[in-house]
């Protein structure tokens, strides 16, 4: 049995949303730049890396850690 790490999943989702919002925000500013094409290339690369890290964090968090049956604190207790 595996134990999911929801904190890692939540951080991954927040990073994903922030990267998308950053890209959309910079898209609105790019028209005022002296070189909008180069600006959007850089913004796209940064956003892509952050989205990749966010997806990795979500997957790792959902897969979780293997629960060791010898640890009494992680084994469910019957009362």
Image (cartoon, grey):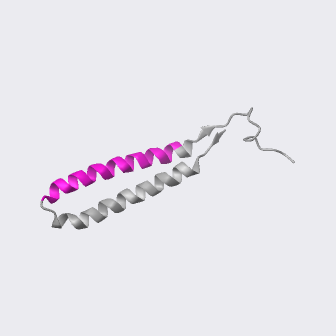
Q: Is residue 51 left or right of residue 39?
A: right
Q: In the rendered image of this protein, does residue 70 appear above or below residue 49?
A: above
> How many numbered marks, from 0 up?
0
Q: Position of residue 16 (x, y in %)?
A: 41, 55
Residue 34 figure quarter: bottom left
Q: Position of residue 50 (x, y in %)?
A: 37, 49
* Magenta-colored span: 35-60
Q: Position of residue 37 (x, y in %)?
A: 16, 56
Residue 22 figure quarter: bottom left
Residue found farthest to the top: 70
Q: Is residue 18 left or right of residue 43?
A: right
Q: Residue at x 58, y 47 (%)?
A: 5
Q: Residue at x 36, y 56 (%)?
A: 19
Q: In the rendered image of this protein, does residue 61 appear above or below residue 20?
A: above
Residue found farthest to the right: 79
Which quadrant holds the N terminus? top right
Q: Position of residue 46 (x, y in %)?
A: 30, 50
Q: Residue at x 60, y 46 (%)?
A: 4
Q: Is residue 25 left or right of residue 3?
A: left
User: Of helix, strand and loop, which mostly describes the magenta segment?
Assistant: helix
Residue found farthest to the left: 34
Residue found farthest to the front: 34
Reply yes or no: does residue 42 show up in magenta: yes
Q: Is residue 17 left or right of residue 34?
A: right
């Amino acid at each position: 049995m595996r134990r999911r790490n929801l904190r890692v999943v939540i951080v991954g989702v927040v990073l994903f949303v922030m990267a998308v919002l950053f890209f959309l925000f910079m898209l609105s500013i790019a028209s005022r730049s002296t070189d909008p094409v180069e600006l959007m290339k850089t913004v796209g690369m940064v956003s892509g890396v952050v989205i990749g890290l966010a997806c990795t964090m979500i997957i790792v968090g959902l897969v979780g850690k293997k629960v060791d049956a010898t640890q009494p604190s992680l084994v469910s207790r019957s009362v």
